[in-house]
Amino acid sequence: MTAQLPLPASMDAGAVPIGAAASLVEDEDGGRVFVHGELSYGWDAGDSVSRRFAAAKLADIKAGSVAEVATAFGVDPGTLWRWRQDLSAAGVLGLAPEKSGPKGPSRLTDAVMSRIRSLRATGLSLRAVGAAVGVSEFSVRRTLAMETPAPEEPAAAHPGPPVTEPVQEELPVLPAPLDRSGERAWARTGLVQCAAPVFAPAARVPLAGLFLALPALETTGLLECAKEVFGALPNGFYGLETILTGAVFQALAGEPRAEGITRIDPAALGRVLGLDRAPEVKTLRRKTAALASRGKAGDLLTAMAARHLNGSHGEGGDLAAVLYVDGHVRAYQGTRKIGKVHSTRLKFPVPATEETWVADAAGAPVLVVMAEPGAALTGELRRLLPRLRTIVGDDRRVLVGFDRGGWSPALFKHMAENNFDVLTWRKGITEDIGPSHFAEVTHTDGHGQTRAWEAADTQVEVPVGTTGEVFPMRQLSRQVNTPGGGSRQIHILTTNTNMPAGEIIYRMGARWRQENYFRYARIRFALDSHDAYTSTDDDSERSVPNPAKRLAYQQVLAARTRYEKTLAETDAAMLAARTPPPGTSTVLITNTMHNKITADLLTAETALDTAQAAHRQIPARVPLGEIAAGQQVLETETKLLTHAIRMAAFNTGSSLAREVRTNTGYARGEDEAHALIRQALTGSGDIDPRIDGYLTIRLDPLPTQRATTAISELCTHLNTTETRYPGTDRILRFEIKNKETSLKN
């Protein structure tokens, strides 16, 4: 039809062209469509059905392209496509506008509302009540908020409109962040203490799974203890809670260092923090430096440790009943002159900083302190005991486990006198226990797994010093195989006489959990990273072991070895000289012969006396400045702060993994719980703040159905905690989408 041109395309100069054949004229009286100058369609003002019919037919007869027709009528092509489908399926009646609001009568009848109130009175949760009566949780909440009518009141003669649920619109996908430029301007002038988290409705938000960490993060006490210790940061856009929460989120997202924020979309992390964008690297470093300058990082760690050890754990019972202590060498790769420490991991001395870590009964990190340069574990344990007693908070006996680096019978006696029980391996060579003392011992752990060992439970006396004093201890011995088909005995020493033998052996073996944390944190949480590049001069007057004393002692050992060898050779020569040949009854040894035989022995004895005298004259300890002038130590406050953040992140992830194992039906929970949590925390989801007082996080499904089901069960469990988002009064609610919901939104 468009091939003929009997009339012009439009009869009105103000018409909107539609392709090459049609035009549209709309005014206050209605609208008209001309095709090649002929009036083909017309409608009155407000007649939306005829208008939609005209648009659909113009597209059907190809008077113009779909895009041209949609543009002329002021709609998008998708809407025009839907009009054409409705016209084809139901005729002109299909183009009538749909009724707004609910499509049927309200489900909240008087009977339903009465039943909701009755079920809620029994203690059921809002979700359970909604499922029982077949309405949403929002309807349950709204019903409970309504006043209950008194039974004696007469019914109203003209009841009002039925109560209906509001129509929830679809969330916009990744809308632009809320404009916070005004607050940023005020923050630059110091007029704002910190920007409060504000959440806008958004769908498919990256990293929305990080919200799952907040209930577990609250139990670590990081945010609460930080507010008690530091109070607040100086006025600025990013406050203390935002900085710490963002740092934990970074660590859980796989970027624990400040520089890692450059590999995370700042807008995505900002949405999770309730801001327009996350802080930059320089901001993180500046805020961390402001906290470190107060010198209270140790107080923060102590407060967190006290909060952590006041709880209980399904596997270890009271977490403070058993503590593990171990030293950790953090190697330094920079150019500063840092003292060298022997690294058991690298197996040679390296410039490093020593740290002393404390873990709970489950192997989770509790406390870390910077050790004195060159200090042994024995000295660090003695220095740590008063702090541990303050953290535990009472006089109960605490079992402290450590390796052979802490071997010191004098320390064992000191710990026992201060209500600390010792648990360690025996050091040195001792006599084996007879086979008759061995018997089978067992222990059942918190997971229900039973282990059995052949062990001997005996009492021994350990010498204290060289004065002849002894200290009685309990010894558990085991027979273990050695390479080559042999066997040997290993011995565990403890001052605890009440704990069963099987549990003692189990607790000693569980000390390796602390080593496992070091390995895991080195990979996942940048345990050995340099989070601060500043250093200070070491105390030049600090007393340190004199290396010359060690060298002199080595010379004494060498001289003693030569003397003993020469003595043996001299004795053999004298014996030969005194033994007469066969057939001879007398032997004559002159002074000359004697002096010749003993000459080498006299020389060796003189050398030994000289070496011993030189060794005695060298002082055992000297000021540091005499042997290592200009030595420096690394800044510690910033590192302790980052340790506190990453410990909280690790304990948060471990707590969520434990919830997966105990509160979900995930079949592979024992082996894959941590991997599942890492996958869920970095997943996407919706942020829905439209219900006052609540912040609903609706996560997208995970790749597998079993993982999605497990996280759904985890969400149900986390909802019972009613955790509030830090800095707001909104309670977090977690959901997970099904496939239909995910495809729709």
Image (cartoon, rainbow, N blue to C red):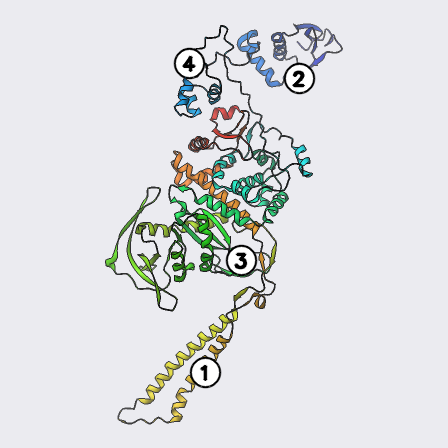
Residue located beneath label 3 in the image? 352
Q: Is residue 530 visible?
A: no
At label 4, the amino acid type is: Ala
Mark 2 or mark 4, whichever is nearer to me: 4
Residue at 49% across, 33% down: 723
Badge 1 crowding class, 10 Å Cα cut-off, few under 14, some 14 to 19, many 20 or more, is some
The mark found on residue 606 in the picture is 1
How far apart marks 3 and 2 lie (CA) works out to 70 Å
Name the residue at the front extreme. Answer: 152
Residue 687 position, x and y percent, is 54, 29
Q: CA distance from mark 2 to mark 4?
A: 51 Å
Q: Residue furthest left?
A: 436
Circle 2: residue type: Thr
Vertical comparison of 694 with 241: above or below: above
The tag earlier along the polypeptide, 1 or 4, is 4
Task: Classify 10 Å Cα crowding around label 2: few (below 14), some (14-19), many (20 and above).
Answer: some
Give the residue type that dot 3 points to. Answer: Ala
- Is the N terminus in the top left, top right, bottom left or bottom right quadrant? top right
Q: Quadrant of residue 266?
A: top right
User: Which of the two labelled residues, at mark 1 and mark 2, occupies the earlier sequence position?
Assistant: 2
Query: Against 270, is 618 above or below?
Result: below
- Along the viewing direction, whichever of 698 and 580 lies nearer the viewer: 698
Q: Where is residue 593, by image quadrant?
A: bottom left
Q: Which mark is residue 111?
A: 4
Residue drawn at x 67%, y 32% as measured from the top left: 182
Mark whose residue sits in front, 4 or 3: 4
Q: Which of 277/585 is in front?
A: 277
Q: Earlier in the sequence, mark 3 or mark 1?
A: 3
What element does badge 3 sit on? strand
- Determine whether label 3 and label 1 are within 8 Å by CB: no
Residue tagged 2: 71
